[in-house]
């Protein structure tokens, strides 16, 4: 057997304040993938490239056994993702950040000023500013993968004038759409728990604001199903009435799963939510809000069932 090592250098977007001996390397075993992840932290580390604004550094080393013929394939990001290297590194990083935040709160009641989430990749974690990975096969460096931890903020044609006008009016983004966009972000960045919470909030707020705008009596503590039925009565038509039967069924099923996922989280303390389920219910909430107000949280054609389920 051969040995694959992938070393992720992660420049943090937040500085480390180390008051402990951190010489010990943290290690996590992932039996499902056969990967072992080692994590070390370095204070006052100077990133080789200038201008990235990274503070200190986390070093993640993922080890696994491979076949000798895997040498070429191991140089591709797709293979590393397929073998769980990317996901396991991201999980280890997210867990360590969560443990540090939890220990700090339990010991000093300090509230962390940084996010602690498990993302889909280590470089997409919001605590990471810049990243790269070096791949070793049987102890020899075979490639360096430049990664980015800094998403761009696009300003497309025609957007800036609208931004200026909205700022001059002091306009707020509707709460339901703001929460919907948060749900999309968390659903696609590897934090399904927060995605479910935000999707539930977006759908309930949208329903209540719609009913209020139509002069409907305050429904009080009605659940999501009851609120939806009231909205259908006010509009005089069924939810997703313009979709074909197959797509409408998939969307309704996804909305039904939304409170089920929330209850799984809140009442059972379960955090093992499937990404496909979370993406699916978020898209369904997006479509449902579009049905309510005649617009969608994002511009797209009516979703196919395969899209709604989060499959490619």
Image (spheres, rainbow, N blue to C red):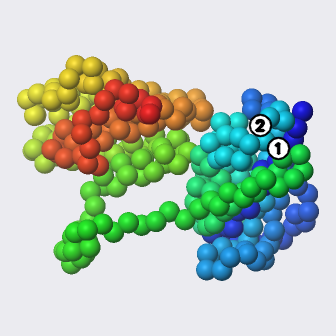
**Upstream in sequence: badge 1 or badge 2:** 1
Q: Which mark is residue 85?
A: none
Give the residue at mark 2: 70
Name the mark nearer the viewer: 1 or 2. Answer: 2
Task: Identify whether 249 is placed above or below 204.
Answer: above
Q: Is residue 154 visible?
A: yes
Q: Secondary structure at mark 1?
A: strand
Report if the CB atoms under discs 1 and 2 are less than 8 Å apart: yes
Q: Nearer the viewer, residue 161 or 238?
A: 161
Q: Residue at x 59, y 46 (%)?
A: 120
Q: Quadrant of the C terminus?
A: top left
Q: Is residue 105 visible?
A: no
Q: Nearer the viewer, residue 232 or 195?
A: 195
Crowd class of label 2 (few under 14; some 14 to 19; many from 20; radius 10 Å)? some
Q: Residue at x 45, y 51 (%)?
A: 185
Query: Picture coordinates of residue 146 (x, y %)?
Result: 65, 61
Query: Picture coordinates of residue 74 (x, y %)?
Result: 73, 43
Query: Picture coordinates of residue 228 (x, y %)?
Result: 23, 31
Q: Quadrant of the N terminus?
A: top right
Q: Secondary structure at mark 2?
A: helix
Image quarter of residue 44:
bottom right
Crowd class of label 1 (few under 14; some 14 to 19; many from 20; radius 10 Å)? many
Q: Is residue 239 left or right of residue 80?
A: left
Q: Residue at x 42, y 47 (%)?
A: 183
Q: Nearer the viewer, residue 57 or 171?
A: 57
Query: Picture coordinates of residue 101 (x, y %)?
Result: 69, 57
Give the residue at mark 1: 4
């Amino acid at each position: 057997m051969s040995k694959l090592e992938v070393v992720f250098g992660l420049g943090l977007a937040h500085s480390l304040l180390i008051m402990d001996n951190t010489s010990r390397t943290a290690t996590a075993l992932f039996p499902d993938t056969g990967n072992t992840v080692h994590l070390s932290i370095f204070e006052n580390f100077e990133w080789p490239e200038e201008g990235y604004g990274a503070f200190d550094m986390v070093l993640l080393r993922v080890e696994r056994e491979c076949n000798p013929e895997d040498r070429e394939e191991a140089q591709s990001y797709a293979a590393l993702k397929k073998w769980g290297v990317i996901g396991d590194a991201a999980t280890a990083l997210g867990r360590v950040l969560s443990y540090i935040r939890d220990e700090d709160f339990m010991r000093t009641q300090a509230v962390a000023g940084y996010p602690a989430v498990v993302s889909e990749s280590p470089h997409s974690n919001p605590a990471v500013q810049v990243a790269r990975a070096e791949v070793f096969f049987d102890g020899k460096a075979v490639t360096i993968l430049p990664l980015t931890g800094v998403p761009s903020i696009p300003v497309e044609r025609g957007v800036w004038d609208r931004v200026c006008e909205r700022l001059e009016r002091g306009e707020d983004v509707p709460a339901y759409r703001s929460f919907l966009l948060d749900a999309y972000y968390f659903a696609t960045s590897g934090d399904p728990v927060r995605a479910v919470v935000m999707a539930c909030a977006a759908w309930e707020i949208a329903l209540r604001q719609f009913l209020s705008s139509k002069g409907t009596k305050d429904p009080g503590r009605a659940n999501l199903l009851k609120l939806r039925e009231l909205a259908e009565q006010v509009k005089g038509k069924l939810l997703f009435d313009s979709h074909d039967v197959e797509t409408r069924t998939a969307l309704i099923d996804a909305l039904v799963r939304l409170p089920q996922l929330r209850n799984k989280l809140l009442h059972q303390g379960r955090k093992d939510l499937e990404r496909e389920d979370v993406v699916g219910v978020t898209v369904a909430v997006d479509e449902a809000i579009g049905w309510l107000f005649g617009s969608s949280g994002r511009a797209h054609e009516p979703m196919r069932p395969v899209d709604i389920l989060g499959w490619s």
